[in-house]
């Protein structure tokens, strides 16, 4: 796993730093919409990004966050069939008055993952993943995603139903900037 950025004190504003007014994430001049469309275009898949109206500020590395999101969208495409839908929802969740998080969910209606495979889905398992939707997997993507999310003090969760699809949700504590 490549070394994660050790930079301290970086704030990521989901709506402004990563998401300009055209509602697309930006990384070195490319929008997540552009990259998602390129990933999904080959299989004629469809992409939708849903953002909250308010700014959501998380503490972390914007480049690594983009890498994790890119991996999740790529997986959603890889394990979905031609014409499938991929949805990313960014939302604010209040667990209590003092505990609020930014949740980013990537949802697909692909082949799904068997329940017995979910227990170790974030473990390094080179070539362990079964071939699905005509695609092979190296077995390191979700391991890297979890490492990035954990390094940024986030949480990751996956829910999946075989033949119905998968939802991967990542959560980060919201930061307030005065």
Image: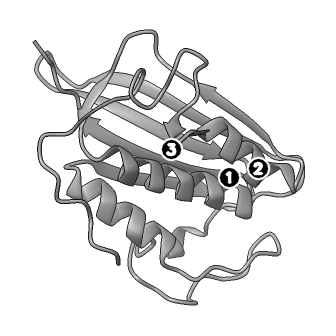
Circles 1 and 2 in contact, beta carbons < 8 Å = no
The number of discs equals 3
Q: Residues within 10 Å of mark 2 (few under 14, many from 20)?
A: few
Q: Which mark is residue 78?
A: none
| Residue assigned mark 2 | 38
In three-dimensional space, the C-alpha distance between marks 1 and 3, rounded to whole angstroms, equals 31 Å
Q: Which mark is residue 165?
A: 1
Q: Nearer the viewer, residue 16 or 166?
A: 16
Identified at 12% across, 48% down, the residue is: 8
Which quarter of the picture shows residue 12?
top left
- Tell me, what colour scheme is on the image? one colour
Which quarter of the picture shows residue 121?
bottom left
Q: Is residue 79 visible?
A: no
Which quarter of the picture shows residue 88?
top right
SS under mark 3 = loop
Q: Is residue 158 visible?
A: yes
Looking at the image, is 121 positioned above or below residue 154? below
Residue 166: horizontal and vertical position, in percent? 61, 52
SS under mark 2 = helix
Looking at the image, is 16 positioned above or below residue 123? above
Identified at 35% across, 44% down, the residue is: 62
SS under mark 1 = strand
Q: Quadrant of the C terminus?
A: top left
In three-dimensional space, the C-alpha distance between marks 3 and 2, rounded to whole angstroms, equals 16 Å
Residue 127: horizontal and vertical position, in percent? 58, 90
Q: Which mark is residue 28?
A: 3
């Amino acid at each position: 796993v490549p070394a994660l950025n050790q930079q301290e004190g970086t704030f990521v504003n989901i709506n402004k730093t990563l998401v300009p007014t055209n509602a697309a994430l930006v990384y070195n001049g490319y929008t997540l919409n552009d990259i998602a469309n390129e990933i999904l275009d080959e299989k004629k898949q469809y992409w939708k990004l849903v953002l909250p109206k308010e700014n959501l500020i998380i503490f972390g590395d914007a480049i690594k966050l983009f890498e994790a999101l890119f991996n999740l969208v790529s997986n959603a495409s890889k394990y979905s069939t031609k014409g499938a839908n991929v949805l990313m929802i960014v939302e604010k969740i209040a667990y209590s008055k003092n505990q609020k998080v930014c949740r980013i969910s990537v949802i697909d209606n692909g082949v799904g993952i068997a329940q017995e495979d979910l227990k170790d889905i974030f473990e390094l398992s080179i070539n362990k993943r079964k071939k699905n939707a005509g695609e092979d997997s190296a077995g390191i993507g979700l391991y890297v995603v979890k490492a990035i999310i954990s390094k940024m003090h986030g949480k990751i969760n996956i829910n999946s139903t075989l033949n119905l699809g998968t939802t991967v949700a990542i959560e980060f504590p919201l930061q307030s900037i005065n």
